[in-house]
Amino acid sequence: MQFNLAQREITLKIVYYGPALSGKTTNLQSIHKLIKPEGRGRLMTLDTRDDRTLFFDLLPVFFETASGFKVKLKLFTVPGQVIHNSTRRIVLAGADAVAFIADSQRTMTKANNESWANMHENLKLNGLNPDEIPAAIQFNKRDLKDIKSDAEVDDVAKKGREPVFRAIATQGAGVMETLFGLLKNTWGSLNTRHSFEQKFRISQVEFLENIFKHMDLGAGPLPFK
Ligand SMILES: Nc1nc2c(ncn2[C@@H]2O[C@H](COP(=O)(O)OP(=O)(O)O)[C@@H](O)[C@H]2O)c(=O)[nH]1
Ligand SMILES: [Mg+2]
């Protein structure tokens, strides 16, 4: 969390992590599409030399609280390719929460596991505790064949502390649910570590409602309370 007292501005950083081609960029593109222009900034994409790799994407989402604080949410993705580890570590620095985008295809199980381990390692190298940072797991590409079954996904959910979501990011399905689930936990973590509610007078419901008020939620209301 970055806090600028003079401008009464709070900036939160959310990082989308995962193996190459799991759908991190697609998640951000879908979220960007679902937010009305007044609630978002420009989606930036920097391409690196090997064209299938994106350096990072940044998606700022803004709102102002009743107590007069401006909250900015910055969403980043990392390049998944093994050779871009130093970039991943830099992007992860100062993260307030991580969304881990796994590829549901069976052939990607090893890549998912390696990326998960790599994320833990890079969190530690950045002085962040992998057991404490708010995290959500998304199993993306549910529309493809030869994917982990629902029962197997449920198993992952049972074993870990992170909430688990299913998605088809190319269709925008499950992307808001993932972000919402993650931000619910993020508020809890901020409140524990920074007395968020007391200091800034932002309740969890106000926090979530403000972030999602500009978003087209399509499938129905999210569980704010
Ligand atoms: N079938 C299918 N393809 C997807 C889905 N999400 C992403 N993709 C495709 O997977 C490829 C990699 O996606 P991208 O978002 O660039 O992956 P990144 O490397 O994690 O950022 C692209 O061709 C996407 O269109 C999905 O839910 N289903
Ligand atoms: Mg990408």
Image (tube, grey):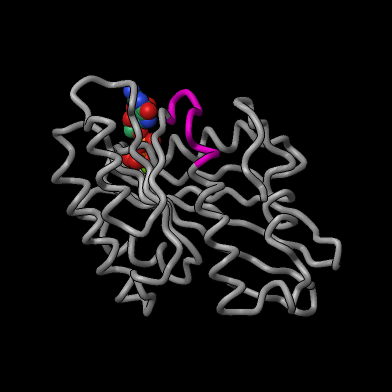
Q: Residue at x 60, y 31 (%)?
A: 33
Rendered image quadrant of residue 25: top left
User: Is 105 or 54 nearer to us in this picture?
Assistant: 105
User: Is 204 or 121 nearer to us in this picture?
Assistant: 204
Q: Residue at x 33, y 61 (%)?
A: 87
Magenta span contains residue 192: no
Q: Main secondary structure of the magenta part?
A: helix
x, y (%) of residue 203?
Answer: 73, 63
Range of residues picked out in magenta: 169-177
Magenta span contains residue 174: yes
Q: Residue at x 50, y 66 (%)?
A: 96
- Using the image, determine if residue 80 lies above or below residue 218: below
| Residue 87 left/right relative to 178 | left
x, y (%) of residue 194?
Answer: 61, 79
**Where, quadrant-wise, is the N terminus in this rendering?**
bottom right
| Residue 72 left/right relative to 63 | left
Rendered image quadrant of residue 23: top left
x, y (%) of residue 173?
Answer: 48, 28
